[in-house]
């Protein structure tokens, strides 16, 4: 009888130890999982098992504006800013494109969101009512104001690259022609072609470099 009680006590003791070991393993598992969790990765570094976010020209416009304003904030406090089209660096600098049109519109948006006073000089003094629609914007200088309180201008150039387009932007004070701030970024070919794919001759011409 004493032997049976001793055996029974040993069994309970072993079962108790095993239970404690199991609880220790279970409680340690979440901590091990946390330690083994992978570090955060940028979308471009993730595996292709997940759908990648779509990038547009707007993201690159935002990068330009943030770099321009981080270099110099005078435009936020002292005057109106106008935004022009960017021209290809190997052109006569007087021809725009669908890409440059969209880029200037995106820069105007991002400057405004950044708190900069932006003036849209393409706004006429009237609303033009036509059979095809009603408009307040024009590219005819005869319909626009001759004098505007623009103190700074954002302009720049584009350079065709073998993998996309290089953008160089600058914030210039008009009266002195001084470059107040400069920024640059690179737009991949896929993003550029997404903007100009529905146009005729406005195709990205790739170059070595």
Image (cartoon, rainbow, N blue to C red):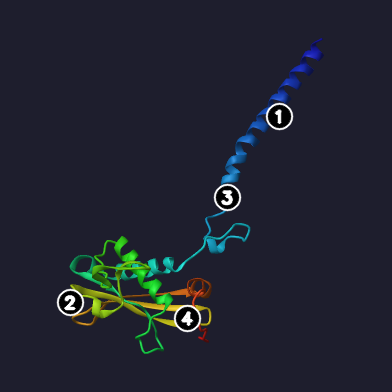
Q: Nearer the viewer, residue 132 or 24?
A: 132
Looking at the image, tell me whether mark 2 or mark 1 is earlier in sequence order: 1
> Which residue is label 4 attached to?
202
> Which residue is label 2 attached to?
147
Q: Is residue 132 above or below residue 91?
A: above
Residue drawn at (79%, 11%) of the image: 2
Label 4 crowd (10 A; few <14 / some 14-19 / many >=20): some
Q: CA distance from mark 2 to mark 4?
A: 32 Å
Question: Which of the two discs, 3 and 2, sits closer to the camera?
Answer: 2
Q: Are the residues at dot 1 and dot 3 in contact (C-beta closer than 8 Å)?
A: no
Q: Which mark is residue 38?
A: none
Looking at the image, tell me whether mark 1 or mark 3 is earlier in sequence order: 1
Looking at the image, tell me whether mark 1 or mark 4 is earlier in sequence order: 1
Q: Secondary structure at mark 2?
A: loop
Q: CA distance from mark 1 to mark 4?
A: 75 Å
Q: Is residue 70 left or right of residue 198?
A: left
Q: Quadrant of residue 185?
A: bottom left
Q: Nearer the viewer, residue 129 or 85?
A: 129
Q: Is residue 169 left or right of residue 175?
A: right
> Which residue is label 3 attached to?
37
Residue drawn at (65%, 36%) of the image: 25
């Amino acid at each position: 009888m004493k032997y049976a009680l001793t055996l029974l006590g040993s069994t309970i003791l072993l079962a108790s130890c095993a239970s404690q070991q199991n609880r220790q393993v279970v409680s340690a598992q979440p901590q091990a999982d946390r330690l083994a969790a992978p570090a955060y990765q940028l979308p471009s570094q993730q595996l292709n098992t997940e759908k990648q976010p779509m990038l547009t020209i707007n993201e690159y416009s935002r990068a330009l504006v943030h770099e321009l304003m981080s270099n110099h904030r005078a435009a936020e406090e002292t005057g109106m800013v106008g935004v022009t089209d960017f021209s290809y660096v190997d052109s006569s600098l007087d021809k725009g494109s669908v890409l440059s049109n969209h880029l200037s519109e995106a820069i105007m948006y991002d400057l405004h969101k950044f708190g900069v006073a932006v003036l849209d000089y393409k706004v006429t003094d009237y609303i033009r009512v036509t059979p095809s629609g009603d408009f307040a914007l024009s590219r005819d200088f005869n319909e626009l104001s001759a004098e505007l309180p623009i103190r700074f201008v954002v302009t720049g150039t584009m350079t065709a690259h073998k993998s996309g387009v290089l953008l160089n932007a600058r914030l210039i004070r008009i009266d002195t022609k001084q470059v107040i701030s400069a920024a640059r970024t690179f737009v991949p070919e896929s993003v550029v072609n997404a903007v100009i794919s529905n146009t005729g001759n406005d195709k990205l011409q790739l170059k070595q470099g």
